[in-house]
Image (spheres, rainbow, N blue to C red):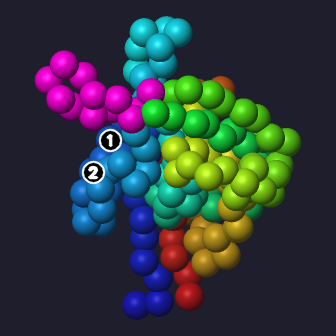
Amino acid sequence: MDSSYIIIDFTTVTQKFWAIATWAGKEETIFHELYYLPQEEDFVMLLYPEYYQSLAVRLYNFDGKAVTPEKTYVISFKERRDREGNTYKQLTSSKSFPSYEEAIAYLSQQESANYRIIGTNPFQSPVPLTAMKHYQQIYGSDIRVKGINVDNLSAIKIFEYIK
């Protein structure tokens, strides 16, 4: 057989990405983590470059196309402990860069390891992505869904891998 297929749905890449991490034998925190925002007294999920670089996200969210980020965010954080002794990350600052390369240069100047490139929208990559040349979308369901700043997505997409 000269081809194989990948079936991906909206919920898997936006709400149940932990399943992909688990199936791959990886920790979920490699791809995203919750951060505490003191000004809002709430937690927010921040996405790491590894999320955007994953096969499922590159195919479903970006249809396997090349992506050049419009801007890239770098955050700083402190690790804190709650009353029960659980560790969490508290966002301390956020800085926007017009290019990924400028964000990388800024990161390289930091002495602390408590800086990360992040994204907040699964459909806007903060990191450049190359086109996936061996994958072709062959099906998109008629059932449509709405993502963050993205309308009219097929709920299910099927891609064929061609050698």
Q: Amino acid at mark 1?
A: Lys
For this orientation, the residue located farthest to the top is 40
- The label number, if any, that marks residue 16 in the structure image: 1
Q: Nearer the viewer, residue 127 or 117?
A: 117
Q: Position of residue 131 (x, y in %)?
A: 70, 68
* Residue 122, placed above or below residue 91: below
SS for tag 1? Answer: loop
Q: CA distance from mark 1 to mark 2?
A: 6 Å
Q: Is residue 116 above or below residue 147?
A: below
Q: Which residues are magenta?
A: 79-90
* Residue occupying the point 61% across, 78% down: 134
- Look at 40% across and 90% down and name the residue there: 1
Q: Horizontally, is 61 left or right of 86 in the view?
A: right
- Considering only vertical position in the picture, is 140 above or below 123? below
Task: Let me know if residue 9 appears in the view.
Answer: no
Q: Is residue 158 magenta?
A: no
Q: x, y percentage for residue 30?
A: 40, 54
Badge 2 is on which residue? 19
Residue drawn at x 82%, y 51% is 102
Hey, what amino acid is under mark 2? Ala
Quarter of the image where one finds residue 115: top right
The quadrant of the picture occupied by the C terminus is bottom right
Q: Mark 1 touching mark 2, by CB under 8 A?
A: yes
The residue drawn where x is 76% and y is 35% is 96
